Image: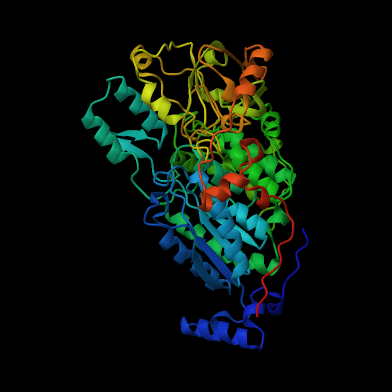
Amino acid sequence: MTVSRKRPEDLRSHRWYGASDLRAFGHRSRTAQMGYSHADYLGKPVIAILNTWSDINPCHTHFRQRAEEVKRGVWQAGGFPVEMPALTLSEPFQKPTTMLYRNLLAMETEELLRSYPADGAVLMGGCDKTTPALLMGAISMNLPAIFLPAGPMLRGDWRGQALGSGSDVWKYWAEKRAGNLSEKSWEQIENGIARSPGHCMTMGTASTMTSAAEALGMTLPGAASIPAADSRHARMASETGRRAVTMVWDDVKPRDILTADSFDNAITVVLALGGSTNALVHLIALARRAGIPLNVDRFDELARRTPLLANVRPAGEFLMEDFYYAGGLRALMSRIRDLLALDARTVEGATLGDAISGAEVFNDQVILPRERPIVASGSLAVLHGNLAPDGAVIKPAAAEARLLRHRGPAIVFAGYNDMAARIDDPALPVTADSVLVLQHAGPLGAPGMPEWGQLPIPKKLLEQGVRDMLRISDARMSGTSYGACVLHVAPESYAGGPLALVRDGDTIVLDVAARQLHLDVDESELARRRAAWRKPEPHFARGFGALYQNHITQANDGCDFDFLEGTAVTPEPEIH
Ligand code: FES
């Protein structure tokens, strides 16, 4: 990477502030209106702090304070901080799913940076989709940008037991439905599971994607693992602000940092963490924004050589707070350094090798040694076959081993409401060997490809002690979920993919070792069903939903909007 130190008149913001015309007069007089004098901003890098804080986002409740700490760092380094609120994507509250809006935040990020006098950016995110969305927009705008991860919340607590976001909700909900947990206990869990600022503290999508951002080189070293409530998080925020200013002078831009190697690093890290399957969709979208071809099969290739070492729920026992005290992501990366491209660049202007130099593991129970992995390889598997011509994914480590090679009759649900209405019906002809199939849960069908992929186990089977069964859908699954769930089936059923052709009683064959997902029905019968298939009515006649349904790509292509992919140049705005 060539480091070229800029002069003040080279700054992008100079076009707004440095001219002697009428418009620049307006920009300066309006900056004066905000209480700033020339000494505060003229000739200084303007650092846009994109803050996804909101009263409705529990994972970002500390972001108002953190923005102040970022500003402190920006001022100290001689920059001019400008905080800009950006769309929050609050996983628990936004419906039908935050995934419907990931690309909207990505567009907002790119256009905020383009249309205002930003020289560089600090991207404040963490709750699931905020991380990929902010990074996607910043990659497309390609100004110097650094990501500030929200940090995980503290461990949950119930009667002295550690509770994990999501994972323990699914676990205790199943016990409650099986009649093994009282209302009072359930209420105690409700009040103890989320007890500090920060994102989910299991290895869910949030921890997966903030860790991926660090492995991509887009955060300060060690930033992704610090718990949100730890004072070290506040100090990291200030350091991030300081670094953003230097990055502008050194002109370190996302596409200088991101290469095919850095994406391999991110995928390898996600696999060693036992990270969320959502990483496939997000990393493919990010790579394509950077002009780097990436497809689902690369995840499978890297999974075959990567051990799962993070003993963090849902694949393991511990939580992100423990992971941080054990050394955090730098320590984990030091354990797999032979699998990483250590010369990949980072926002620090140095290499990933420099970023993990001196990192140590302090607790071998949490970050396992290479000779004692949770699984030696294949923590994630990409499947193909006549049921998923463009691919599907499963997390074998999160499933009961007996189901990884399975043949069983399908029970088909035409959509979420159909599933919810019938799943607990005592008359449902379901056994532990059945294969639950959910249609119309993909990017177009749901819409928004929600996290419906962990279909509930029918109550009558729960009561018999069944805790896992094979489930197949074109949905995603929360990274905090577990079970034999085949996800991201592409093309999706709503678009006429083979999942749409499955009928009750059809035999489905899964063979994870062979990476096969097969619908055991004669091709002539499938052709007959295909000819009878009718394209469903679109969900939206207007608005953002209409834009979404006209341009969303399938899961194996990253679910970006087709017109946002790639690196074609968008002109800088005219200033007249
Ligand atoms: Fe925000 Fe899980 S709800 S990260």
Instruction: Give the residue displayed 65% in from the left and 77% down from the top.
Output: 575
- Image coordinates of residue 70 in percent, x first then y, are 50, 64
Q: Is residue 449 visible?
A: yes
For the N terminus, give its image quadrant.
bottom right
Question: Is residue 335 at least partly visible in the picture?
Answer: no
- Colour mode? rainbow
Q: Residue at x 47, y 49 (%)?
A: 151
Residue 53 position (above or below residue 449): below
Residue sitting nearer the eye, 202 or 500: 500
Quadrant assignment, res 170: top left
**x and y, in percent, of residue 310 in the image:** 54, 33
Depth check: 406 or 495 in front?
495
The C terminus sits in image quarter: bottom right
Q: Is residue 67 above or below residue 59?
A: below
Task: Identify the residue at image location x=55%, y=58%.
Answer: 123
* Residue 539 horizontal side relative to residue 392, left or right: left
174 w.r.t. 353: above or below: above
- Farthest left residue? 184
Camera-nearest residue between 72 and 357: 72
Residue 477, above or below 258: above
Q: Position of residue 270 (x, y in %)?
A: 59, 37
**Picture mark count:** 0
Q: Quadrant of ligand 1?
A: top left
> Horizontal and vertical percent for residue 192?
30, 39
